[in-house]
Amino acid sequence: MAAVPLLVSLALALAICPLVVRTLWRHGWTRANHRGARVAHPAGIGALVSALVALLVLSAFELAAGVGVLGVDTVAATCFVAAVALLGLADDLWGDREGAPRGLRRHARALVRGRPSTGAAKAVGTAALAVVVLTVLGFTGAELALAACVLTLATHGSNLLDLRPGRSTKALLALLSALTLGTLNLEPFTTLGLVLPPILVLLVPDLRERAMLGDTGAGAIGALAGLWLVLTLPMLGQAVALGLLAALAVYGELRSISVLVEQRPLLRRIDSLGRIHA
């Protein structure tokens, strides 16, 4: 039964995500990517819708059949990822207006001056949601505070990486592979089984430059990555992860991650893997 959420979510994602991408195209919801090509945006809506539909379908099945398929942890984790994706959607819809602040420092200045941006609201909202979901998952005290910081910075880190097709999803896959092989802990595949499949399904149109995830998709990826970290690592491991995420945030504030990738042949090859335009 543990694999049921994962399989149901995958089946629904294969049907819903392509439909969302086509619908965005049909209604003119597009944006120019890094090459200037028009792509469907924000395709991360597909991940949001797929995960929520899977949650509703399995919840209805539980009520009708009287069989437990979803645990409290799975429901809480799915709601957290969906809520963070919604904050990203708000940033996609209203955060790109002319003169909107960019970067952590500019968002902070705007907040101090009484002009909160969607980016600042996203950061504060993510932190608050992290505390709620971690409390439901049984985190308390210092463990809760540390894990909440990891979740918040993981979401920000995903947004920093999502500047080229497939980059944030590839980083997620590398992270999940390392955590799974390093800890041999398979429980996150159950807890996060509703949100992982649609993100993977969207990798194809992302790489083929048919769609752009936007902050909606990047937020979902970051929330998923953060949860995977705190569900598999002890506090020491989380502290190390927090330090690395903080370093990424600082670097992204001061330098270009894309330039860094382009200057490193190995990173450049991995980054371009699977794209139709390297």
Image (cartoon, rainbow, N blue to C red):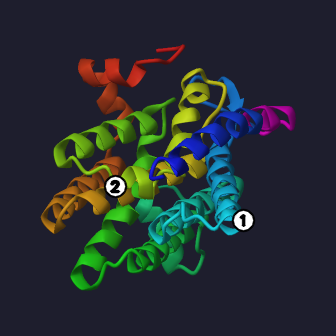
Q: At 49% from the left edge and 79% from the top edge, which residue is drawn? A: 112
Vertical order, 132 against 169 (above or below): below
Q: At 47% from the left edge and 47% from the top edge, which residue is drawn? A: 3
The answer to if 268 sits in the magenta stretch is no
* Dot 2: element: helix
Residue 43: image location, x then y, percent? 66, 40
Q: Amino acid at mark 2?
A: Glu
The image's mark for residue 187 is 2
Sequence-wise, the earlier of marks 1 and 2 is: 1
Q: Which residue is mark 1?
A: 64
Q: Which residues are magenta?
A: 21-29
Residue 237: image location, x then y, percent? 16, 59
**Residue closest to the eye, 221 or 50:** 50
* Dot 1: element: helix
Taking the image as shown, residue 274 lies to the left or right of residue 233, namely right
Q: At 61% from the left edge and 27% from the top edge, which residue is drawn? A: 205
Taking the image as shown, residue 88 lies to the left or right of residue 181, namely right
Front of the two marks 1 and 2: 1
